[in-house]
Amino acid sequence: MSQNPCAAWALICEIHSIHKLKKVKDHRSKSYITYGPEVLLYTTLLKNVMGLTSMRSMSDALNTDECIENVRKTLQLDELEELPHYNTFNDFLTGLEVTELEEIRTYMVKELFKKRCFNQYKIEGRYWRVIFFGSMTCPIIKEW
C-alpha cells in the first residue's frame, strides 16, 4: 500500500472501514479506556500509510492540532484532545486477537481490489504479479 497511499487513505476514510474498526473487541479494563479501538487502529493505519517506522515516530508526527482534528472528524468523534501515547498502542495491540486484525486486513484488501486500486500494477494490463515473500530460513533436513 505504500506504492499508492491515496488509495489506502481513501479506503481507511470510508465509513464502512471505520465501523469495522469500532467493532474490534477491546481487552483493556473499561475504567482505564480513554481511546476506543477505532482511534488506535485508525492511527496505526495512518502510521503505515505515511511510512513511519516506529510507534514513537508516529506519536511525534501525528500529535499536531491539524492531524488530531482530522482524525476526530474522520472518526466522527465529539472530541479528541490528543492522540494516544505509543505505550497505549502497544498495550492495545498486544492483547488484540490476531483473527480480528486478519479480518480487517482481508476486508481492506478486498475493498482495494473492488476499487481497482491495483490494476495499474498488472503486467501488460492483463496479468497479476505473484510475489512470494520468504523472510524465514528453514533448516535443511539431510535425511531424505
Image: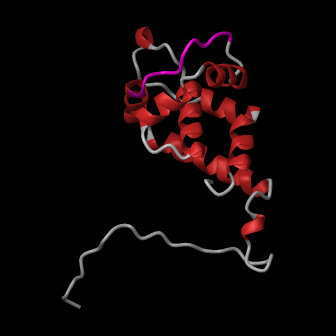
Q: In this view, does 57 lie to the left or right of 82?
A: left
Q: In this view, does 4 lie above or below 52?
A: below
- Comparing 24 with 69, the one in front is 69
Q: Where is residue 83 in the image (x, y as percent from the top left)?
A: 53, 21
On the question of residue 62 being in view, the answer is yes
Q: Is residue 137 above or below residue 98?
A: below
Residue 80, magenta (yes or no): yes
- Comparing 126 with 104, the one in front is 126
Q: Where is residue 66 in the image (x, y as percent from the top left)?
A: 66, 22
To which quarter of the image does residue 38 belong? top right
- Comparing 100 with 137, the one in front is 137
Residue plotted at (19% across, 88% down): 142
To which quarter of the image does residue 47 belong? top right
Q: Main secondary structure of the magenta part?
A: loop
The part of the chain drawn in magenta is 78-86
Residue plotted at (61% across, 32% down): 21
